[in-house]
Image: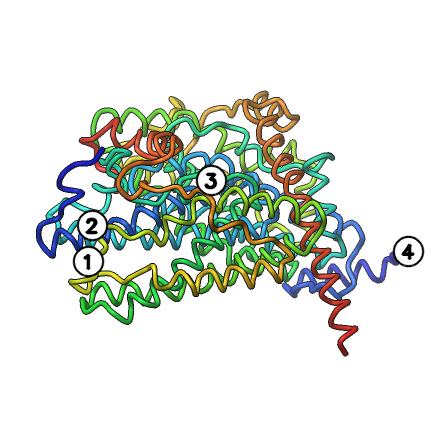
């Protein structure tokens, strides 16, 4: 289900590109999902906050893609966003699920932002590439805000009304099987660790689960069973059926007029 | 009861160019007119998010996606501080919102047209924001302090939006044949509705005289429209776009551009609710409002519980 090149990067540079794309794809796809809220939020303040988070995440993706394009000899960041198909996208399945209701959106954002927080924190302490590090440090500031914002909403919805509590519990129950991929490690990750290009994410799982559990507990929400079936394989191209539709929408204009200039 | 003395003193303040602030005395009619104008402006910013938001997920480059998302976010911001500004006149945001969703309050009719291609996004930036800037530059001098200041801030951001829209349209107008076609088509569809944004002719605008007397506005609808046409003709020419008006010609005597008859029947029809997108816009906004109710309730209930806990603790 994968191109050979995707699965077996030969050089350190190829490995680096793969790592950049994994990070970027997660952020582009979730940013895209968040952007679907523009004009439809539950409150004006939330329209602003969701658009702001979407903008940050698409911005992070764009910067990471641009760096990958530099190394990879591709024309620009748009190459990765607009001219790859489902199987080539390396994002985890969690971020491609439809936006759902506000509880679903916020629960996913909290789970993902908590993961991003620990991942970026560890990466910043480890990578030696200055440009990459600078990028991570800049994005980390924004990730802290996304985490704080989504965490506050978890408390409000969990310990708000009976309706909001039920909706939020349902959201976490539905999302949980997609959280395993955040900490799954494959050969590529292992190789990247050897080259100090990536961190052992399985090590921050405990901190992640502690933060998530304590927040959910404060929000009077049950932490779903961690021993349940966990979705896996999206980083290798085994996506849900949702990604194809997202890409069809995102890419159609750009691909319909490939000779046109749109920047 | 308002006395003649109060009214006279108020008029003197206006004529002296003083700003009226929330706690100052003001005629009830002045307050009502401002609530109407400011909330209408706020509703327009919010409904305006819909036609543009329509292209966020399909924007043709990451840069354009971010530019559009930021623009729509700015509009939410404008809506927010315009509602806050209106609240200084003793009304609640919730009531204002419900008045356009379920009552009789209006928003700008321009947003009752569909965005059919990406070029529409560029044209909204150039023409619709361009027209809004002409209006808001005047309103930034409005006699009501909070409204004047809100417009000053809005104008800065709108100028940026206009620049971005115009630049991208210029790119399309000199791009591939498909892009050129989209650009011209979008201008053809948006030109007349944009001219209608300034409102009916002065002779059919019952509120104008009073608003000018009170310094809420300083120019008439027709003056603003003429100013907009004058500057837009040159901008269109510069990027090779044709404005769809065969009667458009420079008048040596007046030093302005004369233009053809505005289709007022269409204007009144859309204002009254019969435009291509009126029903859909309201439906989308009601849906967001109604589906968001449980979220707003949860936030209120959580805040109440938290306060109670803090009171118990102390």
Q: Secondary structure at mark 4?
A: loop
Residue A50 x %, y %: 49, 50
Residue B25 x %, y %: 79, 63
In depth, the one of A219 and A26 nearer the eye is: A219
Q: Are marks 2 and 1 in contact (CB under 8 Å)?
A: yes
Between the C-alphas of marks 2 and 3, the distance is 27 Å
Q: Secondary structure at mark 2?
A: helix
Residue at label 2?
A18
Residue at label 4?
B1
Q: Is B43 on the left-hand or right-hand side of B65?
A: right
Marks 2 and 1: same chain?
Answer: yes
Specify whether residue B253 is in view: no
Looking at marks 2 and 3 on the same chain, the residue that comes earlier in the sequence is marked by 2
Marks 3 and 4: same chain?
Answer: no
Residue B181 in which image quadrant: top left
Using a 10 Å C-alpha cutoff, classify the residue at mark 2 as few (fewer than 14 neighbours), some (14 to 19) or many (20 or more): many
Residue B308 in which image quadrant: bottom right
Q: Is B166 on the left-hand or right-hand side of A153?
A: left
Marks 4 and 2: same chain?
Answer: no
Between the C-alphas of marks 4 and 1, the distance is 79 Å
Residue A234 in which image quadrant: top left
The disc numbered 3 marks a residue on which chain? A
The disc numbered 1 marks a residue on which chain? A
The disc numbered 4 marks a residue on which chain? B
In depth, the one of B279 and B290 nearer the eye is: B290
Using a 10 Å C-alpha cutoff, classify the residue at mark 3 as few (fewer than 14 neighbours), some (14 to 19) or many (20 or more): many
Between the C-alphas of marks 1 and 3, the distance is 34 Å
Between the C-alphas of marks 3 and 4, the distance is 51 Å
Marks 4 and 1: same chain?
Answer: no
Residue depicted at x 75% and y 69%: B309
Residue A36 got which mark? 3
Residue depicted at x 78% and y 49%: B29
């Amino acid at each position: 289900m994968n191109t050979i090149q995707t699965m077996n990067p030969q050089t350190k540079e190829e490995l680096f590109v793969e790592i950049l794309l994994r990070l970027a794809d997660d952020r582009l796809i979730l940013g895209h999902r968040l952007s679907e809220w523009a004009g439809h939020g539950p409150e004006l303040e939330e329209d602003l906050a969701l658009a702001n988070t979407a903008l940050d995440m698409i911005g992070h993706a764009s910067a990471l893609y641009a760096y990958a394009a530099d190394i990879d000899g591709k024309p620009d960041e748009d190459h990765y966003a607009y001219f790859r198909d489902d199987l080539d996208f390396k994002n985890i399945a969690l971020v491609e699920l439809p936006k759902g209701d506000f509880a679903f959106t916020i629960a996913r954002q909290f789970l993902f932002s908590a993961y991003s927080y620990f991942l970026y924190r560890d990466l910043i302490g480890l990578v030696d590439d200055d440009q990459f590090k600078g990028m991570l440090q800049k994005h980390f500031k924004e990730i802290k805000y996304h985490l704080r914002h989504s965490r506050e909403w978890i408390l409000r919805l969990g310990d708000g009304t009976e309706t909001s509590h039920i909706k939020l519990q349902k959201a976490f129950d539905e999302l949980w099987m997609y959280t395993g991929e955040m900490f799954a490690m494959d050969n590529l990750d292992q190789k990247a660790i050897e080259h100090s290009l990536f961190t052992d994410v399985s090590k921050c799982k405990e901190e992640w689960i502690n933060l998530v559990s304590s927040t959910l507990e404060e929000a009077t929400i049950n932490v779903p069973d961690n021993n349940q079936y966990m979705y896996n394989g999206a980083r290798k191209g085994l996506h849900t059926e949702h990604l194809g539709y997202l890409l069809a929408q995102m890419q159609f204009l750009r691909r319909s007029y490939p000779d046109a200039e749109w920047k | 009861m308002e006395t003649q003395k109060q009214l006279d003193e108020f008029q003197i303040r206006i004529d002296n160019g003083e700003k009226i602030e929330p706690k100052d005395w003001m005629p009830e009619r002045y307050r009502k007119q401002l609530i109407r104008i400011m909330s209408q402006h706020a509703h327009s910013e919010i409904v305006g998010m819909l036609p543009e938001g329509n292209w966020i997920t399909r924007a043709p480059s990451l840069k354009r996606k971010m530019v559009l998302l930021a623009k729509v976010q700015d509009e939410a911001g404008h809506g927010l501080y315009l509602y806050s500004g209106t609240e200084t006149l003793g009304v609640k945001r919730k009531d204002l919102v419900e008045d356009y969703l379920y009552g009789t309050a209006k928003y700008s009719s321009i947003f009752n047209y569909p965005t059919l291609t990406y070029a529409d996004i560029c044209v909204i930036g150039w023409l619709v924001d361009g027209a809004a800037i002409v209006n808001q530059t005047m309103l930034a001098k409005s006699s009501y302090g909070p409204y004047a200041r809100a417009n000053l801030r809005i104008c800065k951001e709108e100028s940026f939006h206009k620049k971005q829209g115009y630049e991208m349209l210029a790119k399309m107008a000199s791009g591939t044949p498909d892009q050129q076609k989209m650009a011209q088509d979008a201008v053809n569809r948006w030109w007349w509705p944009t001219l209608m944004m300034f409102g009916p002719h002065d002779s059919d605008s019952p509120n104008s005289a009073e608003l000018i007397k009170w310094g809420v506005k300083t120019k008439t609808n027709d003056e603003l429209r003429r100013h907009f046409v004058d500057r837009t003709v040159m901008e269109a020419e510069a990027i090779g776009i044709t404005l769809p008006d065969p009667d458009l010609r420079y008048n040596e005597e007046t030093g302005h551009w004369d233009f053809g008859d505005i289709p007022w029947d269409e204007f009144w029809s859309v204002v009254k609710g019969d435009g291509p997108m009126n029903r859909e816009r309201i439906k989308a906004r009601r849906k967001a409002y109604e589906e968001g109710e449980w979220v707003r309730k949860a936030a209120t209930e959580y805040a109440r519980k938290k306060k109670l806990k803090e009171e118990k603790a102390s």
